[in-house]
Image: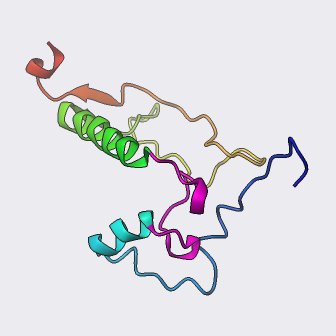
Amino acid sequence: MPCGMSGKSPLHNFPHAPSNTTTRYTYDFQTASEATSNPDASKQDQFVFGAGRRVCQGMHITKRSLFLAISRLLWGFVFKKALNAEWKEITPDIEDLTKGLIVFPRLFRRGNWFYYKNTKVKD
């Protein structure tokens, strides 16, 4: 590659390759832990932290920090769907995404959709 050139990995194609017969979705935790550290890209379960020699050295810290953050949110709050004018729950369409190289969910109506579980959490 020429100097200064950047490249993008086709991240969607790696786990969806026809030759990929991994069992990572069967709650086999040993397989999942081995898949992340496996240098063979066809045997990895996710590619957010890079692949091969370019894998992030601190991905275990990020995964644990993310787990702690999400578990604390679930411990302290009750999450509910927003309500429309008829007091019915609004379910956002998971397929409604922006177009482009990097996609995001489109904006959707939000209301008071999370509450403290008790006053002890609030204080």
Q: Is residue 105 above or below residue 15?
A: above
Q: Position of residue 54 (x, y in %)?
A: 60, 54
| Quarter-of-image position of residue 52 | bottom right
* Up-down relation of residue 80 to residue 34 (above or below): above
User: Would residue 27 be visible to someone looking at this image?
Assistant: no
Judging depth in this view, the residue of 86 and 69 nearest the camera is 69
Q: Position of residue 88 (x, y in %)?
A: 40, 41
State the residue lying farthest toward the top.
123
Magenta stretch encompasses residue 90? no
Vertically, is 20 above or below 14?
below
> As drawn, is 15 to the left or to the right of 82?
right
Where 11 sits versus 118, above or below?
A: below
Instruction: From the viewer's perspective, tell me whether residue 32 is left or right of residue 119.
Output: right
- Left or right, 104 with respect to 37, comes to right
Please report the bounds of the magenta region as a residue range. 38-57
Q: Nearer the viewer, residue 121 or 15?
A: 15
- In this view of the protein, which residue sits in the foreground, 23 or 98? 23
